[in-house]
Amino acid sequence: MSAIAPITGTLKKRIFTDITIGFALGGAMASYWWWGFHNGVINKREDYYAKLAQLKNSEE
Amino acid sequence: MLNLLNMINIIYNDVPTPYSCYFQDSATPNQEGILELHDNIMFYLFIILGLVSWMLFNIVRTYTKNPMAYKYIKHGQTIEILWTILPAVILLIIAFPSFILLYLCDEVISPAMTIKAIGYQWYWKYEYSDFINDNGETIEFESYVIPDDLLEEGQLRLLDTDTSIMVPVDTHIRFVVTAADVIHDFCIPSLGIKVDANPGRLNQVSALIQREGVFYGQCSELCGINHCAMPIKVEAVSLPKFLEWLNDQ
């Protein structure tokens, strides 16, 4: 038997917590990107084209 | 605070502007698709960035003061399977929409008109091969950059040209692109067009412009000393205005 016992079980001990925190962090950033930024840009564009279509219809 | 970040990022314009981030406003379905795919991929990248940053921070924090760390570990089956399968799944999720967009953009279905763009050192020449003038010749003209000393108020340096490509909106247009000397690249970001102009080869790309406006592009393949001075200017106008312009040619 070695003087220091082999280090085992570390993966199970902390990996789940670390992955959860990591994904939570990344998920928060990604969520802001999608719902806070991307959707705003798309909505603005869709509104513009809706108005344009309305204008075209009224001209015809 | 978060809105402040948005203010920094978005610049609503159809031209490149100093220090701008993100894309120019889209004007074709192709560019809208490209934008959607980019934002989709960025979503996954943010998740990966969060995970990797946290792991890196954690590893540095934990093992800075631990010289004995993992002395006996040579191989970790579970974690190796994990970090092989997970990226593969993420790549697949990214690859499928990417291929769909690629093939959709590549499709040129029954265009209403064709414009041929020929790259020269250092200007562009355009041919409207579907139309002929009174003398029976196809409409063609060259397009040169406006030199700095001739720029008028409101004109854009290294972007404005003496003649521009006139196109009608809501019309399927095909650009046939080639070059006469070296490789150039016909690129208009707002229209989602970026295609190499190779001597002796014809490349084609289509565009359906959805709104009127002036769209600017630049040669995007280093083609010589004046590579920066052969911009592309597209004017999208209504069909009656386009026909009027056509009659004047």
Image: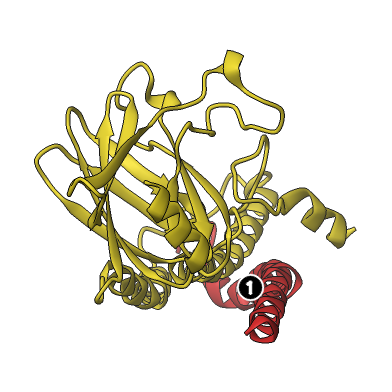
Determine the residue located farthest toward the front in the rendered image.
B134
Instruction: Return the residue nearer the eye: A53 or B204.
Output: A53
Is any part of residue B141 visible from this angle?
A: yes
Which quadrant of the figure has residue A60? bottom right
Instruction: Return the residue nearer the eye: B186 or B103.
Output: B186
Which quadrant of the figure has residue B144? top left
Indicate whether B9 appears above or below B218: below
> Whole-percent x and y of residue B152?
66, 25
Dot 1: chain letter: A
Secondary structure under tag 1 reads helix
Indicate whether B93 appears above or below B30: below
Give the chain ID for the red colour.
Answer: A
At 54% across and 33% down in the image, what residue appears? B160
Indicate whether B220 appears above or below A53: above
Q: Quadrant of the N terminus of chain B?
A: bottom right
Which quadrant of the figure has residue B171? bottom left
**Colour representing chain B:** yellow
Q: In the image, what residue type sits under mark 1?
A: Phe
At 35% across and 16% down in the image, what residue appears? B225
Mark 1 lies on residue: A23
> Whole-percent x and y of residue B218?
44, 38
Instruction: Return the residue nearer the eye: B153 or B104.
Output: B153
Instruction: Return the residue nearer the eye: B139 or B174.
Output: B139
Horizontal relation, residue A35 to residue B195: left or right: right
